[in-house]
């Protein structure tokens, strides 16, 4: 038999019978569950608010750090662009000027800098959008300028190599050695022809010496002629030096090279003689630029002292007859 329980009721000052039915027990359990659930929700809401506030504070701090890093990167890029602009200026005014080369085209330096409306679309709406866009544009500008300058330097390297080759090829020494030189008989210009007795253009210099004296190539090049088939020149060697330069060595007594042979400055190419239209042993030496005869005196700078060079110019300018 179940025991009946009573509970004191202070309102009526009497004892009321306690309901121990399963419904009453379920009701009590429900009250406890609901109370616990409400309490848990309150705790979670308070905790979420705290976490959210902390996250917002940390996010704001990270955004501020990001902003400072972007501003620093922007300053560095602006400085690097100034440095690159100075390099571009030296490229044009110094490096290319040394080789008489045209400046690297401005349009090539600006390739890829045209606006692309959709290029920065992904950053629209982001925090610090304007700063991010400015920095990105500076990065693009720097990359474009850097690529252009790299290509310009490639061209300069090529010019340097070509300049070195050109300096080796330009005729710049006497065709015979000073120790073998008797005299500089005739200079460049209008001279009295020794056979015809009339004023005629003398397109080279006449270096006199004993028959059999060595004649040397005055610059690197390729022998394109070694015969006696050009009227008046006698035995003639012609060297093509490239870059528009050609030299001729006439009246030789013997050849020491063949057509097609590569020669370097100072190589033995022939022996001095008295063949063709000539009144005495000598080598008639010509320098031609782009097919036109030029005064060889201006190219005798590689093996003469300044005093010797001045003396040669003085001798060559005297109105003597050619040989």
Image (cartoon, rainbow, N blue to C red):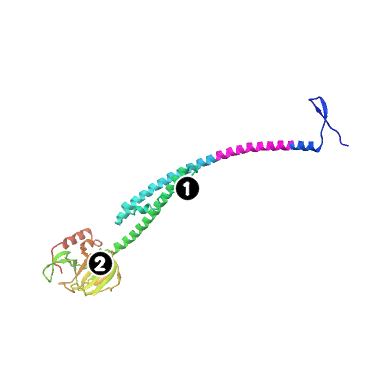
| Nearest the eye: 55 or 231 | 55
- In the rendered image, residue 148, in percent from the top left (x then y), is placed at 38, 54
**Magenta range:** 31-58
| Nearest the eye: 294 or 34 | 34
At horizontal 30% and vertical 62% (from top left) the residue drawn is 166
- Residue 101 left/right relative to 323: right
Q: Main secondary structure of the magenta part?
A: helix
- In the rendered image, residue 116, in percent from the top left (x then y), is placed at 43, 50
- In the rendered image, residue 192, in percent from the top left (x then y), is placed at 12, 67
- Position of the C terminus by quadrant: bottom left
| Nearest the eye: 22 or 258 | 22
Front tag of 2 and 1: 1
Mark 1 lies on a secondary structure that is helix
Mark 2 lies on a secondary structure that is strand
Distance, label 2 to label 1, CA atoms, is 62 Å
- Residue 4 left/right relative to 47: right
In which quadrant of the rendered view does residue 173 lie? bottom left
Comes first in the chain, label 2 or label 1: 1
- Taking the view exactly as shown, the residue that stands out farthest to the right is 1
Q: Residues within 10 Å of mark 2 (few under 14, many from 20)?
A: many
In which quadrant of the rendered view does residue 179 lie? bottom left
- Taking the view exactly as shown, the residue that stands out farthest to the left is 197
Q: Is residue 48 magenta?
A: yes
> Is residue 23 among what the camera can see?
yes
- The circle drawn on residue 121 is 1
Q: Is residue 27 magenta?
A: no
- Residue 148 left/right relative to 288: right
At horizontal 30% and vertical 63% (from top left) the residue drawn is 168
- The circle drawn on residue 246 is 2
At horizontal 25% and vertical 66% (from top left) the residue drawn is 246
- Position of the N terminus by quadrant: top right
């Amino acid at each position: 038999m179940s025991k009946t329980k009573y509970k004191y009721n202070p309102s009526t000052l009497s004892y009321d019978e306690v309901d121990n039915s399963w419904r009453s027990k379920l009701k009590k359990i429900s009250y406890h569950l609901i109370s616990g659930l409400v309490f848990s929700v309150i705790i979670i809401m308070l905790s979420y608010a705290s976490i959210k506030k902390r996250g917002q504070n940390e996010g704001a701090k990270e955004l501020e750090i990001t902003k400072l890093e972007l501003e620093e990167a922007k300053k560095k890029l602006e400085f690097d662009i100034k440095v690159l602009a100075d390099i571009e200026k030296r490229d044009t005014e110094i490096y290319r000027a040394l080789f008489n080369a045209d400046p690297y085209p401005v349009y090539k330096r600006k390739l890829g800098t045209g606006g692309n409306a959709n290029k920065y679309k992904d950053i629209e709406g982001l925090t610090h959008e304007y700063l991010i866009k400015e920095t990105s544009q500076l990065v693009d500008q720097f990359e474009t300028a850097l690529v252009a300058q790299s290509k310009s330097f490639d061209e300069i390297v090529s010019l340097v190599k070509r300049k070195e080759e050109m300096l080796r090829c330009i005729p710049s020494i006497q065709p015979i050695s000073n120790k073998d030189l008797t005299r500089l008989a005739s200079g460049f210009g209008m001279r009295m022809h020794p056979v015809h007795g009339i004023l005629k253009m003398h397109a080279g210099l006449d270096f006199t010496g004993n028959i059999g004296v060595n004649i040397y190539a005055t610059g690197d090049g390729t022998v394109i002629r070694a015969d006696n088939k050009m009227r008046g020149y006698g035995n003639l060697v012609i060297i093509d030096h490239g870059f528009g330069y050609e030299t001729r060595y006439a009246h030789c007594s013997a050849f020491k090279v063949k057509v097609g042979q590569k020669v370097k400055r100072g190589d033995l190419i022939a022996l001095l003689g008295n063949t063709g239209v000539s009144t005495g042993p000598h080598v008639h030496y010509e320098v031609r630029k782009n097919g036109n005869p030029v005064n060889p005196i201006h190219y005798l700078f590689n093996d003469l002292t300044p005093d010797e060079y001045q003396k040669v110019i003085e001798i060559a300018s005297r109105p003597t007859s050619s040989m």
